[in-house]
Image (cartoon, grey):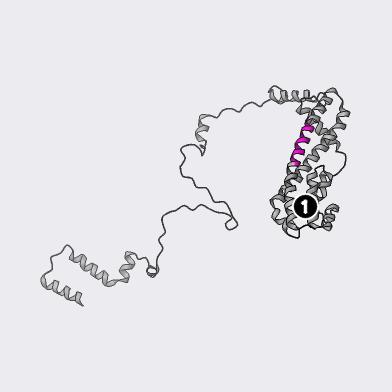
């Protein structure tokens, strides 16, 4: 067995060649299918429906093959992008599906570059790994790849849909008379005097009803400042917008012991202060105190 680094370098080259080759084959098949569709339209125009139904199956099979090549191209691009994971001895679980799908589908294509890339993958991971991919014993091959590789006649409904689409694209009246019927239906739908006439318009609103109507919210100048509500998250399922406002004053530790006092309660709690107030009231508006009175008050303050 060749060294792993040598196999990986060869595989990288073959993947790049396979991608370019697959794209060329898809473009070629698409061009051929376009010519075949034009031939189908000619057969439908001549009224050879049975011949068109048989030949359109080739177009359907070609489209399925093109879709398969597109899937394999994506797998090759994935392996090329993750070429570093291929250096491991065991196959990475994330690359098991594309690798086994390429090993399974490459022999059923005509792309030689893809078949050579398949041989390098078999050489890298061994015969047992390749046998599992060929038999799909572990079910790792992509389901869409298996579906595209099924050999079975197309559904008659699918054949009819293909012929309808081809006739519509190239302007062919098929089935006979259906296109004219569609045009008549379009004309009837556009003409208000047809079967489905347009209902009469409602009467306009009066002035009083207009004055009572609520004006729309968008009417008038808008504020230049707008606040988008926050999106819900697992931490906060119902978020709300909080606008900044004046701070609320809360009583501190020193103010907690004090109660709000009214003049009546303050007078009850401080009887001496009440007496002083009465004395002051008596003094206000009375005669000026003499020197002895001032000396007595000063001595009382010293105490």
Which residue position holds label 1? 99
Say if the magenta span includes residue 29. Answer: yes
Q: Residue 19, percent across and down? A: 73, 44
Asked if residue 70 is positioned above or below residue 235 in the image, the reply reads: above
Asked if residue 276 is positioned above or below residue 143 in the image, the reply reads: below
Q: Which residue is drawn at 83% across and 38% down?
A: 61
Q: Start and end of the magenta stretch?
A: 21-34
Say if the magenta span includes residue 68. Answer: no
Horizontal placement of 72 versus 48: left or right? left
Asked if residue 236 is positioned above or below residue 114 in the image, the reply reads: below
Name the image quarter holding the N terminus: bottom right
Asked if residue 222 is positioned above or below residue 35 in the image, the reply reads: below
Quadrant in the rendering for residue 289: bottom left
Magenta: predominant secondary structure element?
helix
Horizontal placement of 97 versus 268: left or right? right
Mark 1 neighbour density, 10 Å: few (under 14) some (14–19) many (20 or more): many
Quadrant in the rendering for residue 69: top right
Q: Residue 152, percent across and down? A: 88, 41
Which of 74 and 228 lies nearest the eye of the viewer? 74
Name the image quarter holding the C terminus: bottom left
**Secondary structure state at the residue bearing disc 1:** helix
Q: Residue 179, percent across and down? A: 78, 25
Q: Residue at x 74, y 51 (%)?
A: 10
Which of 107 and 241 lies nearest the eye of the viewer? 107
Residue that sits furthest to the bottom in the current view: 303
Q: Residue 223, percent across and down? A: 46, 42
Which of 238 and 63 lies nearest the eye of the viewer? 63
Quadrant in the rendering for residue 258: bottom left
Can the viewer see residue 142? no
């Amino acid at each position: 067995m060749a060294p792993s680094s040598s196999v990986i370098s060869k595989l990288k080259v073959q993947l790049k060649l396979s991608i370019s080759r697959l794209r060329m084959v898809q473009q070629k098949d698409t061009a051929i299918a376009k010519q075949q569709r034009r031939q189908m339209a000619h057969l439908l125009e001549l009224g050879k429906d049975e011949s068109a139904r048989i030949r359109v199956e080739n177009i359907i099979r070609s489209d399925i093959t093109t879709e398969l090549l597109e899937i394999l191209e994506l797998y090759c691009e994935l392996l090329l992008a993750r070429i570093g994971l291929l250096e491991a001895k065991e196959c990475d679980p994330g690359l098991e599906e594309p690798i086994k799908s390429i090993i399974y589908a490459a022999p059923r294509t005509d792309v030689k570059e893809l078949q050579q890339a398949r041989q390098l993958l078999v050489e890298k991971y061994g015969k047992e790994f390749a046998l599992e991919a060929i038999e799909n014993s572990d079910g790792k091959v992509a389901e869409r790849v298996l579906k595209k590789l099924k050999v079975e006649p197309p559904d008659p409904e699918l054949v009819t849909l293909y012929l309808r689409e081809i006739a519509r694209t190239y302007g062919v009246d098929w089935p006979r008379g259906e296109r004219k019927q569609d045009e008549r239906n379009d004309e009837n739908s556009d003409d208000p005097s047809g079967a489905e006439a347009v209902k009469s318009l409602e009467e306009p609103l009066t002035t009083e009803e207009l004055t009572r109507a609520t004006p729309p919210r968008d009417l008038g100048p808008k504020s230049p400042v707008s606040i988008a509500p926050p999106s819900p998250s697992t931490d906060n399922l119902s978020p709300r917008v909080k606008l900044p406002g004046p701070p609320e004053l809360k009583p501190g530790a020193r103010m907690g012991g004090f109660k709000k006092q009214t003049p009546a309660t303050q007078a009850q709690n401080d009887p001496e202060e009440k007496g002083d107030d009465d004395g002051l009231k008596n003094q206000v508006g009375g005669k000026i105190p003499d020197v002895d009175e001032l000396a007595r008050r000063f001595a009382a303050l010293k105490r």
